[in-house]
Amino acid sequence: MIVLEPIGVVRGGRDETVDDDWGRSRARIDLDVARFGPDALAGLGDFSHAEVIFVFDRVGDDEIEFGARHPRGRMDWPKVGIFAQRGKNRPNRLGLCTCRIVAVEGTSLIVEGLDAVDGTPVLDIKPAMSGFQPRERLREPPWALEIMQAYW
Amino acid sequence: MIVLEPIGVVRGGRDETVDDDWGRSRARIDLDVARFGPDALAGLGDFSHAEVIFVFDRVGDDEIEFGARHPRGRMDWPKVGIFAQRGKNRPNRLGLCTCRIVAVEGTSLIVEGLDAVDGTPVLDIKPAMSGFQPRERLREPPWALEIMQAYW
């Protein structure tokens, strides 16, 4: 077992776990000030984007999918394995989002386009580096394009 | 506290935690077959890349940085907060890498360019979707380009 301690919490933004329209959502990630020095976010403002790993903590144990399902229950999309989709009802309930950095204010990070609701535990923040982006053009099935059409 | 159970393990690839030359490293991620159905990876082969979240499990508790440091100890690079860099000595020790999918073989995923060593616990696998890539051009400081020059 891997025991992790949230490094901080999402504050503000939306309070509903909805599927779409996350692009303009603005929120704050407040680091746990008892554990981190004032310099834990130093220099992050030199990056335009951050990758945030968080926990879909509103998903109950009995809602987790271990095999395959239709993304969003859409029967017109193929039934694919839980690791071939990004839905929240997944083992370990980890969310991952690249969002825009609006500002760094001490131990708080203001972001835009983070698809996590108010109160979400955050496990890590990494700067988005161009060298860590995919090094080839992405190939993906049609449903993966359709599912993102109204997401941001 | 957040308690997670690895979904699988990295097998093969490299056995040394080195800084550079990960691009051609080929490895397998074996899902924990006791927990996952044969269809947990179904459809992942329709994607060219996957995002893998793993644990830098060789990093000791006393090696974790909670404030700021020079990336790779390079004094010619600025001292930045641990969340403004991607080094492994970070709180929660989470690694994140977008790698190429070579093949899906039942409950095993063969990947190329995953910067995790043999035996690394894997917490999640997500398909890399174009809709989840940064929606604007990335801005980053010069050291972030330099540190990636020999990485892949």
Image (spheres, coloured by chain):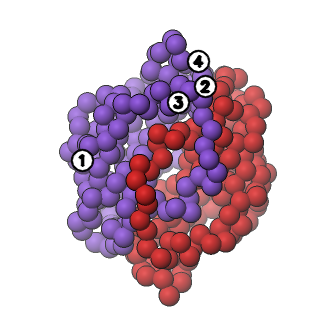
Chain colours: A red, B purple
Which badge, 1 or 4, is on the more N-terminal residue? 1
Residue indicated by mark 1: B26
Above or below, B84 against B103 in this view is above
Q: Secondary structure at mark 4?
A: loop
Quarter-of-image position of residue B132: bottom right
Q: Secondary structure at mark 2?
A: strand
Disc assigned to residue A82: none
Left or right: residue A124 versus residue B147 is: right
On the image, the x and y values in percent for residue A72 come to: 55, 77
- Closest to the camera, between mark 2 and mark 4, is 4
Q: Earlier in the sequence, mark 3 or mark 4?
A: 4
Which image quarter is the C terminus of chain A in?
A: bottom right
Which amino acid, mark 3? Ala
Find disc 2 in the rendering and name its residue.
B81
Q: Amino acid at mark 2?
A: Gly
CB atoms of marks 1 and 2 within 8 Å = no
Measure the alpha-carbon separation of dots 3 and 1: 25 Å
Q: Earlier in the sequence, mark 2 or mark 3?
A: 2
Identity of the residue drawn at 47% across and 39% down: A131
Please rate how many residues cluster around mark 1, counting C-alpha atoms within 10 Å: few if below 14, some from 14 to 19, many from 20: many
Residue wearing tag 3: B144
The picture places residue B63, in percent across and down from the top left corner, at: 44, 22
Q: Amino acid at mark 4?
A: Lys
- Nearest-to-viewer mark from 1 and 2: 1
Q: Where does label 4 land, which residue?
A: B79
For disc 3, the neighbor class at 10 Å (few under 14, some 14 to 19, many from 20) is many
Identify the subunit bearing mark 4.
B
Residue positioned 41% across, 48% down in the render = A135
